[in-house]
Amino acid sequence: MQARIDKLIQLMREFELAALALNPGPTLTYLTGLHFHLMERPTVLLITVEGEMAMILPALETAKLADVSVKVEAFTYSDDPETRPEAFFRAAEHLHLAELDLGVEATRMRYLELMYLGDVLPEHGFLDASACLAGLRMVKDAHELEKMRQAACIAQDALLATLQGLQAGVTEKAVANQLIIQLLSAGSDPDLPFSPIVSFGENTANPHSVPTERTLQPGDLLLVDWGASCEGYLSDITRTFTFGEVDPELLKIGEIVLRANQVGREAGGAGVEAGAVDRAARAVINAAGYGEAFIHRTGHGLGLEAHEAPYIYEGNTRLLMPGMTFTVEPGIYLPGKGGVRIEDDVAVTETGLDSLTDLPRSVLPLEDFMVG
């Protein structure tokens, strides 16, 4: 943990941030090993560029600090909300925050915490520390990569178990529910990366559809976007299947997306721009005449969060480094007809991209995976 905090302090110096405030989430856990839920009782970790740390938290959570391997000063409050401001003031005074601007995670910090912190920063304010924090967790070590590989294996085993029981007439909701059961049975942490996306037929043309009562019928595509968690590290995979005889154009776009996925995975590596992966995958779909039907970026970073840096979009000039992990997920979506997405999780190596996922990528008949 101290090495991670030292890395954060170095980044804070580079970005000229004097102090940071973190509320419960992956970054706080990454730095301390502590797990807290976002709830009505605020919990905030304060860190200065000198490496001093203070945590404001409910008194009932104090026992968790006994397991922290780095020095964190605790400032607690009781169940009475009127005791919270004093804890914030005491922590700010301990770290001499009153004269500093405070960096926060823009996508995570809530108004509740900002309200209390604002009272102790009367002359100053808040800065978006997203750019600073993006560099903290992007490069994974061997332990982290192994947990992500395990998360991918858990997810793949769960899907195969789910597909065995499918038959015509089953609903999207029922398949999604069964997949969740199989994920937990296969060893996933209870906190899944996201609720599985299961879509049939025309619903597959919506990249982020929500499972409905739509039933599986011959002639449908079946798209599943799902993931597992292993000790907090995540997988995020998409596969598409056919059920019965489907429209030939849907088979065609399946072959195009498969090529785009392969080309994208072959395009990355150490020293390559993140945007180059997107451009390579997108070029395949553009050349096939379906460019306007590829309506999202090629991928996103993956780790303790399902979406984190680096983001794989055309204009991203960030150079990939060994240990970075992200998805490669091109797709083609034809409204009213259907869509195909094929998504893999990859890790950057010195020589290219290593795929953490290995489930067959072709758009295969669902019947090949069903029992009986």
Image: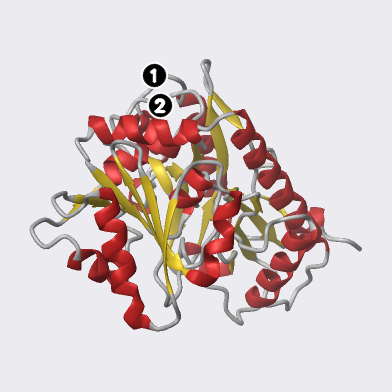
* Residue at x 80%, y 55% (from the top left corner): 369
Say what secondary structure mark 2 lies in: loop
Say what secondary structure mark 1 lies in: loop
Q: Considering depth in this image, is 150 or 227 the residue closer to the camera?
A: 150
* Residue 89 x/y as whole percent: 26, 64
Q: Is residue 317 left or right of residue 224?
A: left
Amino acid type shown at disc 2: Leu
Q: Considering depth in this image, is 187 or 91 the residue closer to the camera?
A: 91
Q: Is residue 98 left or right of residue 346?
A: left
Amino acid type shown at disc 1: Gly
Q: With respect to residue 203, does 341 lie above or below?
A: above
Q: With respect to residue 14, does 201 lie above or below?
A: below
Q: Is residue 6 visible?
A: yes
* Residue 355 x/y as whole percent: 61, 32
Q: Considering depth in this image, is 264 or 76 the residue closer to the camera?
A: 76
Determine which residue is flagged by label 2: 320
Q: Is residue 252 left or right of residue 362?
A: left
